[in-house]
């Protein structure tokens, strides 16, 4: 009767890797630092174990340049590259921020997923419609971008929203708008 021999180091490695947790998805978080820092902190705290949130720590202060091409290259190289999705925290003044527009543009240039999280502080128009950055809205209309509401956010809804965003066809991207040249 043949028996099973001891496990080899190679087979222990295979078993160990199969039992380890999957790597955390890297996402870039774009938001208005002056108005929505608390929401970023909460998002990061709640979802830290599941996602590696890469954020810009206010690019406006880090990249001291008026050269738009240089700034866009820095955004792409230092923040968007290596992530698979940009999450835009949409608060009261987010739609007015040029760096948020530029970060969305860089995301679309790289054909990464785009997801918005509508914060309770989000501005609303006359009919109660939420006001989001124009470039983001154009991609909601095409079906490339989508959003969820902060109040509905939990591990399951975020995972589903990120999966949906990552499944959108890059042929739906609309990145044709001119870049915002200033805030407001």
Image: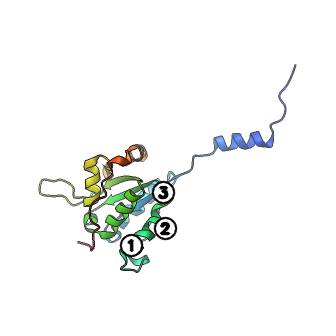
Question: Which residue is rendered at x = 26% and y = 64% of the image?
Answer: 95
Where residue 75 appears, as percent x and y from the top left, is 43, 68
Up the image or down, 182 lies above or below 173; here it is below
Up the image or down, 34 lies above or below 88; here it is below
Q: What residue does disc 2 label? A: 78
- In depth, the one of 119 and 130 nearer the eye is 130
Say which label, 3 or 1, has the lower sequence index: 1
Mark 3 lies on a secondary structure that is loop
Horizontal side of 50 relative to 139 (left or right) equals right
Mark 1 lies on a secondary structure that is helix
Q: CA distance from mark 2 to mark 1?
A: 14 Å
Q: What residue does disc 3 label? A: 83
Where residue 138 appears, as percent x and y from the top left, is 26, 54
Question: Which residue is rendered at x = 88% and y = 19% of the image?
Answer: 1
The disc placed on residue 69 is 1
Q: Residue furthest left?
A: 126
Where residue 165 appears, as percent x and y from the top left, is 38, 47
Asked if residue 121 shows in the view, the reply is: no
Q: CA distance from mark 3 to mark 1?
A: 21 Å
Q: Residues within 10 Å of mark 2 (few under 14, many from 20)?
A: few
- In depth, the one of 99 and 119 nearer the eye is 99
Horizontal side of 178 relative to 39 (left or right) equals left
In which quadrant of the rendered image does the C terminus lie? bottom left
Question: Which residue is rendered at x = 15% and y = 53% of the image?
Answer: 128
Mark 2 lies on a secondary structure that is helix
Q: CA distance from mark 2 to mark 3?
A: 10 Å
Q: Nearer the viewer, mark 2 or mark 1?
A: 1
Question: Which residue is rendered at x = 21% and y = 55% of the image?
Answer: 130
Q: Quadrant of residue 126?
A: bottom left
């Amino acid at each position: 009767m043949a028996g099973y021999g001891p496990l080899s180091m190679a087979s222990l490695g295979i078993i160990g890797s199969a039992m380890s947790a999957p790597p955390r998805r890297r996402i870039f978080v774009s938001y208005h630092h002056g108005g929505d820092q608390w929401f970023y902190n909460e998002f990061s705290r709640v979802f830290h174990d599941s996602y590696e949130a890469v954020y810009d720590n206010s690019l406006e202060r880090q990249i001291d340049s008026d050269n738009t091409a240089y700034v866009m290259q820095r955004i792409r190289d230092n923040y968007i590259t290596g992530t698979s999705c940009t999450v835009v925290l949409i608060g009261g003044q987010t739609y007015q921020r040029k760096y948020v527009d530029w970060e969305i543009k860089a995301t679309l240039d790289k054909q990464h997923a785009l997801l918005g999280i509508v914060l309770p502080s989000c501005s609303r128009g006359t009919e109660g419609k939420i006001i989001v950055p124009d470039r983001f809205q154009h991609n909601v209309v095409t079906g490339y971008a989508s959003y969820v509401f902060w109040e509905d956010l939990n591990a399951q809804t975020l995972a589903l929203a990120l999966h949906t965003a990552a499944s959108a066809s890059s042929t739906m991207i609309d990145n044709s708008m001119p870049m915002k040249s200033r805030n407001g």
